[in-house]
Amino acid sequence: MVSETLAVAGYGVDDNGHIDGILLGRDDDGALRYAGTVDRGLRAGDLAELERRLPLLKVARCLLIEKPQGKSGVRWTRPDVLVEVSYPNKSDDGRLCHPSFKGFRDDLASTGRRPIKRG
């Protein structure tokens, strides 16, 4: 498994208005490229924290350099929240395959450091 720190670029909501997945972005020479969506591994406390933080970061449009296809109803955010995810591999275009949420990376967010990859 590979572990990587990525920025939250947006989120989806279920029929009750609760977060049901987060869209992730990876730094690509100063731009934010879509890396995938994670909904696995999110515990009740994680979801509550996301629901507290993300609406405050809402923006009108997608800040990724390429808007992901097939993603409707996404609520886009400034990429200020960093999270750690793990995954077994990536697709040919760099998208995460079967990612799982591991936790928040507030230690990096507060220092202004860029997302990192550990493998």
Image: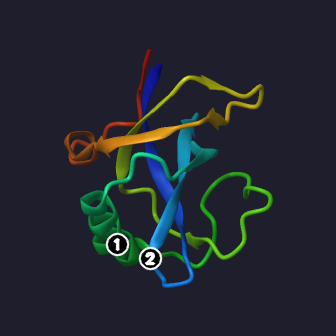
Q: Residue at x 59, y 45 (%)?
A: 31
Residue 44 seen from this side: yes
N-terminal label among 1 and 2: 2
Residue 30 seen from this side: no
For the residue labelled by badge 1, is the local secondary structure a helix, a strand or a loop? helix
Q: Amino acid at mark 1?
A: Glu
Q: Residue at x 39, y 37 (%)?
A: 114
Asked whether, in this view, residue 76 is left or right of residue 66, the answer is left
Which corner quadrant holds the C terminus?
Answer: top left
Q: Residue at x 21, y 48 (%)?
A: 110
In this picture, is 28 found above or below 90?
Answer: below
Per the image, the residue denoted by label 1 is: 51
Q: Position of residue 112 (x, y in %)?
A: 29, 44
Res 43 label: none
Q: Image quarter for residue 3?
A: top left
**Closer-to-camera residue (32/85):** 85
Q: Position of residue 22 (x, y in %)?
A: 50, 58
Q: How many marks?
A: 2
For the residue labelled by badge 2, is the local secondary structure a helix, a strand or a loop? loop
Q: Position of residue 92 (x, y in %)?
A: 77, 25
**Closer-to-camera residue (98/33):** 98
Q: Residues within 10 Å of mark 2 (few under 14, many from 20)?
A: some
Asked whether, in this view, residue 33 is left or right of residue 77, the answer is right
Distance between the alpha carbons at the discs numbered 1 and 2: 7 Å
Label 2 near label 1: C-beta < 8 Å? yes
Q: Image quarter for residue 45?
A: bottom left
Q: Residue at x 28, y 68 (%)?
A: 48
Per the image, the residue denoted by label 2 is: 18
Q: Image quarter for residue 60?
A: bottom right
Q: Residues within 10 Å of mark 1 (few under 14, many from 20)?
A: some
In this picture, is 116 found above or below 61?
Answer: above
